[in-house]
Amino acid sequence: MREYNFSAGPAMIPTPVLEQAQSELLEWNKSGMSIMEHSHRARHFMEMAHNAEACLRRLMGIDNNYAVLFLQGGARLQFASVPMNLTAQSKVANYVDTGYWSHKAINEAKRFAQVVQVAPTNEDVLHPERWQWSDGAAYFHYTPNETIDGWAYPFIPTPPDDIPVVADMSSCILSRTFDVNSFGVIYASAQKNIGPAGLTIVIVRRSLLQYAVEGIPRGMHYQSYAQNQSLFNTPPTFAWYLSGLVFQWLEEQGGVESIEKINYHKSQKLYDFIDRSDMYVNTVPVSCRSIVNVVFSLADETLNEKFLQQAKENGLHYLRGHRDLGGMRASIYNAMPEEGVDALISFMIEFSRLA
């Protein structure tokens, strides 16, 4: 029996996807070899890659005005790639600091652009009417879902003057619906809702491909990949294949709209229990609570290690919060079944009774 992985990433992958990959591991599509053994420029791999991209486009409603790139390097590489690819005409970039990962993105972007934070104070983050926008900014960057803080943006910010919106969707892509046309660039590392670690998805409006700074490394230039169907270099072939299976599984679940309802139901069930409890605490404002990363703490933090050890003994893994925040975190991405959330709640009830 598979146990429940509440890690923020690498996260659970749907069991039917793993079973299909297992059945195809030695031979893919009657080709005589595994998909990971095929040349990335051969017909078999190209067929798989095309189908995976087409499936992702259907799931997210991505039209041909956008290039979909299958890259490597994770979101951290995109913290640098974004300003390198977008600031040829203006070195000014607007950011909003919503937590741990947006702060990391800001610090990296400062190496390549003049970063201006639009929210003057933390209290202004949820009040865009108070934001101070830069004239002629190359783009605006935000993080819709902060995995460490358990905090999610309740709306899509709309900058003035058609400033392109850039979003780090590593933890929320495919978990809820977004209008892709509201964004200039979306990027996401794969190991939460897409597939195994090693793959990074970048969705970029084609009209923005002309704004890379001079001298950008070709391996970081979006245009290099857009012109070569993401095959500028050898891609992470097996991660691409497995992610394609996840995209197919999502379509079988009814698409992103259906999975969003399931995710909301799962998270609400856990939040409702925490809110009623005297032993567990969540301090994130209700309007900003993430539906995929539920953070909480024990009222008596001396019980933390006991809680984690007993949770593991009950098949509930990786519930420790991030080292910089402490407490607990239950990441309940798309592949986490409702039964996993029920098992966690049952354990929390029993633990509070016996502690």
Image (cartoon, rainbow, N blue to C red):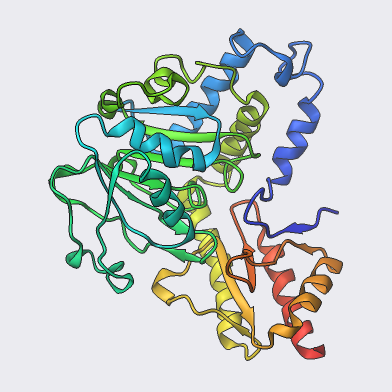
* Position of residue 289 in the picture relative to residue 9 (left or right): left
Identify which residue, 156 or 61, lies in the foreground: 156
* Position of residue 207 in the picture relative to residue 240 (left or right): left
* Position of residue 125 in the picture relative to residue 231 (left or right): left
Identify which residue, 89 or 20, lies in the foreground: 89
* Quadrant housing the C terminus: bottom right
Residue 25 horizontal/vertical position (percent): 79, 25
Residue lying at the far front in this picture: please name it.
Answer: 111
State the count of labels.
Answer: 0
* 64 relative to 189, above or below: above
Classify residue 194 by image quadrant: top right
Residue 294 horizontal/vertical position (percent): 57, 68
Residue 258 horizontal/vertical position (percent): 50, 52
Q: For the point 69% across and 88% down, which residue is it? A: 300
Residue lying at the far top in this picture: please name it.
Answer: 42
* 164 relative to 309, above or below: above
